[in-house]
Image (cartoon, helix red, strand yellow):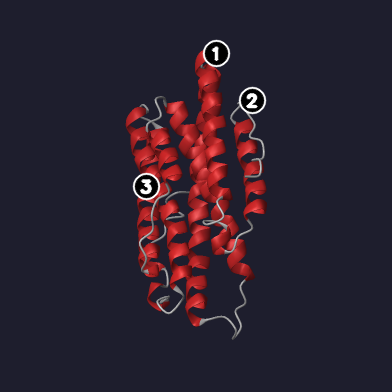
Amino acid sequence: MARRDQWRLEDLGWSTVDVSALPESFRQTAAEAFVQLQCGEQTALFAATRLREWLPEGSARAFLATQQTDEARHVAFFERVVGIFGCEGRVRPSVARLMREVREADTPEALLLGMQVLIEGVAHSLFQEAVRLVETLDDGEGLDSSIRALKTLVAEALPRLARDESRHIAFGLHSLRQRIPRLDGAARLRLEEKVALWGEWLLEQVRDPDLIVGIGMDGGAVCERLLEDINLRIAQVGLHTRLAPLKAA
C-alpha cells in the first residue's frame, strides 16, 4: 500500500500559486499554522527513524522504512508551503514542548503511542478538516485568483497526506495492540499517565484560536471531533484512559 500510494511534490500545481498580494496578516497566520504542522512532521520523521533502530529486524522495520520516506516528503511539503506565504512562522513553545517529550520517549510503546497514535492521529484529523474547509470555498468569480490556486494545491495534497497518515496510525494501533498486553502493571500505568498528559496538550493546541480559528476553522467543533477520534484510538490499543473536554479558558 505504501508503494502504491507514493506521490511526488513535483506533481502538485506549485507554479500557479502566488499569494504575495494577500494581506500580510492572513499570510502570517497561515504560515504560523503550517509551521506547527511542519514541526510535527519533523518529529514524525525523527520518531520513525528511532523506532526503526529500536525494533528488531522484520516487517515492522520494513514498514518504518516506508514511513521515513513519507515523513521526509511531508516535511518538504510544509517547508515549501510556508515559503509560499513569505512569512517566517514560529513554533509555539507549547508545541515544541510536546514534540520534545514525544521524541524523548523512553520506551517503544511510549514512542508509538505519542507519535503513531496521538500526533499522527491529530494530523490526520486536521488534514481531513482542512479538506472539508477547502471544499466550502466558492469556486466562482468572487474567489480571489490567489486563493483559488492555493485551494487547488491544498485540495490535491491534503488527501494524499491524510492517506499516508492513516497507514502510520494503523501501524501504531496494530503494534500497540500486540505490545501493551505484555507490559507489567507499572509500565502500563506510566503509559496511561503519558497518554493523559500528551492528549491534553494536543487538545490545547487544537483549541488555540490563533492557529485554528485564524485559518477559518471552528475550533470548538474541530476539538470535539478530535477528542472522539483520540479516545477511540486509545480504546483500540487497550488503554483505559479517556480524555475529557477541555474546560473553557
Q: What is the crowding at mark 3: few (fewer than 14 residues within 10 Å), some, or many (at least 20)?
A: some
Query: Where residue 161 appears, x then y in whole percent?
Result: 48, 55
What amino acid is found at the position of numbered circle 1 in the picture? Gly
Q: What is the crowding at mark 1: few (fewer than 14 residues within 10 Å), some, or many (at least 20)?
A: few
Q: Residue furthest bottom?
A: 141
Q: Report if the CB atoms under discs 2 and 3 are less than 8 Å apart.
A: no
Give the residue displayed 52% in from the left and 57% down from the top: 210
Q: Is residue 184 visible?
A: no
Of 209 and 107, nearer the camera is 209
Count of labels shown? Answer: 3
Query: Where residue 136 appears, x then y in whole percent?
Result: 64, 69
Give the residue displayed 34% in from the left and 38% down from the top: 49
Task: Classify residue 227 by image quadrant.
Answer: top right
Q: Secondary structure at mark 2?
A: loop
- In the picture of the structure, the residue carrying the numbered disc 3 is 42
Task: Classify residue 54 by image quadrant.
Answer: top left
Q: What is the crowding at mark 2: few (fewer than 14 residues within 10 Å), some, or many (at least 20)?
A: few
Q: Residue furthest front?
A: 249
Give the residue displayed 50% in from the left and 66% down from the top: 154
Q: Secondary structure at mark 1?
A: helix
Tell me the distance, in whole angstroms, between the alpha carbons under discs 1 and 2.
Answer: 13 Å
- In the picture of the structure, the residue carrying the numbered disc 2 is 240
Tell me the distance, in whole angstroms, between the alpha carbons under discs 3 and 1.
Answer: 32 Å
Give the residue displayed 50% in from the left and 23% down from the top: 179
What amino acid is found at the position of numbered circle 3 in the picture? Gln
Whether residue 112 sits left or right of residue 130 in the image: it is left
Pick whichever of labels 1 and 2 is earlier in the sequence: 1
Q: Is residue 148 visible?
A: yes
- In the picture of the structure, the residue carrying the numbered disc 1 is 185
Query: Where residue 153 appears, x then y in whole percent?
Result: 47, 69
